[in-house]
């Protein structure tokens, strides 16, 4: 290896990319952030308050951005092509620049499932049906005529997740807790509203998540109905009629709502698959990037010199993503130490 | 009435727009923990009366929220107040107290006893 500071291409400047770049720069390397969107921050930039402490997403991003202020960052930039060299990689960027680097870190994150693909739920057809993303945006901007002043609100879990027909058999992991968080926020905003969550299983694995559930039940009287929404229709007054089976009593249930929020799931980012193929890196059967192993080497790809951080390998929470970003930076450090 | 050899069964569907939850709403004012039931079924599994009477605290709570008052009252009448269900509830609900409270409420949720 040449005697210069190793350059690491970090693809994606969501929280994974930002945190990894900050750590790499602290370890004495030269990370270069390549972000497709006009601004950094990824999905977290679209959210309002984050579970489990309800901290503003903007605060987290502010501190991550402050930590990466000196780092070379290309926004609004895509990768036109990626090539393997003898001792590194060459990336041709959409701005015409060529970037030669010694390692590549994928921080390309996830895509939110396109809820209009589940036509039976009426997203994009009925005015009162929105997604988790739309609701977070409403909390940020307070501009969305679809929200109004609802008296009855429903949340549909597992939209596009745990659904072979939608091509995603995996669980998105964060949408149960997000649904409960958003249901609580809606109930606090509109205390007179009846709020219903339609779930198949409640998967509340993380620290303090069960507390959200108990609070939603006991303090706010949010109704939890175990059954997958089968179809949504529009009533003559523009409200939506939701049908499901209450599988605990074995009876069909029906309810008319002013607002229905679909918990769109976390699915793979096709860009990452494309780059992975160009670099000869394995993709898993769920479409996410495939870790060298799922216990001890989640942040390593099947190729030395190519690393992963965050939701590019599967659904992750913010703390998990940040921890992976740090561990990827350390793994890259060890990789260069061995080569020296 | 003429017998045509068939009959119409009433729909078993639950309409959550119209279901009357007055008794449940009153119960949870008096025993707020009742709302935290997770339908685990421990109470019914351990219940001394369940095997021959169908008593189930879980089903009582669910029935109250789905307007199934007849079934709820039939179950309540079978309880022996032994308190085993309270000992097993993972949410720490005082189910015996819940049953006693419920027995004092009429269908409109008024305290009558
Ligand atoms: C509705 C919802 C609410 C959530 N709320 C919380 C919460 O409250 N608390 C919590 O802990 N977690 C929450 N999460 C999870 C959280 O969003 C993720 O943990 C986090 O976004 C993962 O960060 P990431 O950087 O790995 O991916 P992303 O946020 O997806 O960022 C990836 C970045 O890479 C860029 N990129 C993608 N492809 C390319 C390309 N080809 N070239 C260049 N750049 C590219 C993207 O533009 C993006 O900026 C929530 C998730 C959802 C769906
Ligand atoms: S986290 Fe919950 S809502 Fe999301 S896919 Fe898994 S079970 Fe469904
Ligand atoms: S108190 Fe009643 S419901 Fe509870 S276990 Fe005893 S008989 Fe069953
Ligand atoms: S044991 Fe408690 S939580 Fe479980 S079903 Fe009975 S009342 Fe509900």
Image (cartoon, helix red, strand yellow):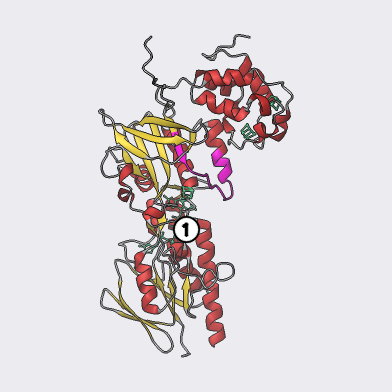
User: Looking at the picture, does residue B26 appear above or below residue A77?
Assistant: above
**Left or right, residue A31 beside residue B96:** left
Tell me the element at label 1: loop
- Reading the image, the residue beneath label 1 is A315
- Judging depth in this view, the residue of A312 and B20 nearest the camera is B20
Q: Position of residue A47 (x, y in %)?
A: 40, 50
Asked whether A170 falls inside the magenta stretch, the response is: no
**Disc 1, ligand 1: is the CB inside 8 Å?**
yes
**Left or right, residue A219 beside residue A121:** right
What chain does badge 1 belong to?
A
Q: Which residue is pictured at 39% across the width and 87% down the height? A: A85
Q: Quadrant of the C terminus of chain A?
A: bottom right
Q: What span is in magenta?
A: A196-213
- The image quarter in which residue A277 lies: bottom left
Q: Position of residue A106 (x, y in %)?
A: 43, 70
Q: Position of residue B28 (x, y in %)?
A: 57, 24
Q: Position of residue A26 (x, y in %)?
A: 51, 72
User: Looking at the picture, does residue A262 appear above or below residue A5?
Assistant: above
Question: How busy is the neighbourhood of tag 1: few (under 14 within 10 Å), some, or many (20 plus)?
Answer: many
Q: Which residue is pictured at 40% across the width and 62% down the height? A: A268
- The image quarter in which residue A39 lies: bottom left
């Amino acid at each position: 290896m040449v005697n210069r500071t190793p350059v690491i291409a970090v693809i994606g400047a969501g929280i994974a990319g930002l945190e990894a770049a900050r750590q790499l720069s602290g370890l004495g390397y030269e990370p270069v952030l390549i972000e497709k969107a006009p601004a950094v921050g990824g999905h977290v930039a679209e959210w309002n308050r984050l579970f489990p402490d309800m901290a503003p997403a903007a605060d987290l991003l502010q501190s991550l951005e402050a930590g990466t202020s000196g780092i070379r960052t290309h926004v609004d930039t895509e990768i036109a092509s990626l090539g393997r060299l003898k001792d590194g990689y060459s990336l041709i960027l959409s701005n015409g620049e060529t970037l030669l680097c010694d390692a590549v870190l994928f921080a390309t994150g996830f895509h939110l499932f396109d809820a209009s693909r589940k036509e039976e739920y009426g997203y994009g057809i009925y005015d009162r049906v929105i997604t988790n993303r739309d609701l977070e945006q409403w909390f940020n901007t307070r501009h969305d005529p679809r929200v109004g002043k609802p008296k009855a609100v429903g949340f549909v879990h597992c939209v596009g997740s745990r659904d072979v027909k939608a091509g995603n058999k995996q669980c998105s992991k964060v949408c149960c807790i997000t649904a409960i968080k958003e249901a609580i926020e809606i109930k606090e905003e509109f205390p007179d509203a009846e709020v219903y969550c339609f779930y198949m299983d409640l998967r509340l694995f993380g620290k303090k998540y069960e507390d959200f559930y108990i609070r939603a039940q006991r303090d706010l009287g949010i109704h939890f109905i175990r059954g997958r929404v089968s179809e949504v229709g529009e009533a003559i007054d523009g409200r939506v009629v939701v049908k499901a089976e209450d599988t605990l009593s074995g009876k069909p249930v029906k309810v008319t709502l002013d607002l229905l929020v679909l918990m769109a799931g976390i699915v793979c980012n096709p860009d990452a698959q494309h780059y992975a193929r160009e670099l000869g890196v394995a993709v898993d059967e769920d479409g996410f990037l495939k870790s060298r192993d799922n216990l001890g080497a989640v942040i390593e790809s099947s190729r030395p010199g190519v690393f992963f951080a965050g939701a590019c390998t599967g659904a992750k929470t913010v703390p998990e993503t940040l921890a992976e970003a740090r561990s990827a930076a350390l793994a890259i450090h060890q990789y260069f130490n061995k080569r020296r | 009435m003429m017998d045509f050899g068939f009959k119409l069964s009433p729909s078993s569907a639950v309409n959550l727009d119209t279901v009357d939850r007055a008794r449940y709403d009153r119960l949870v004012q008096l025993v707020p923990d009742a709302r935290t039931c997770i339908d685990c079924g421990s109470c019914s599994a351990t219940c001394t009366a369940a095997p021959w009477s169908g008593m189930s605290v879980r089903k009582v709570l669910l029935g109250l929220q789905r307007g199934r008052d007849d079934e709820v009252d039939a179950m309540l009448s079978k309880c022996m107040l032994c308190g085993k269900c309270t000992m097993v509830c993972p949410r720490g609900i005082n189910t015996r107290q819940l049953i006693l409270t419920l027995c004092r409420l009429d269908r409109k949720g008024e305290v009558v006893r």
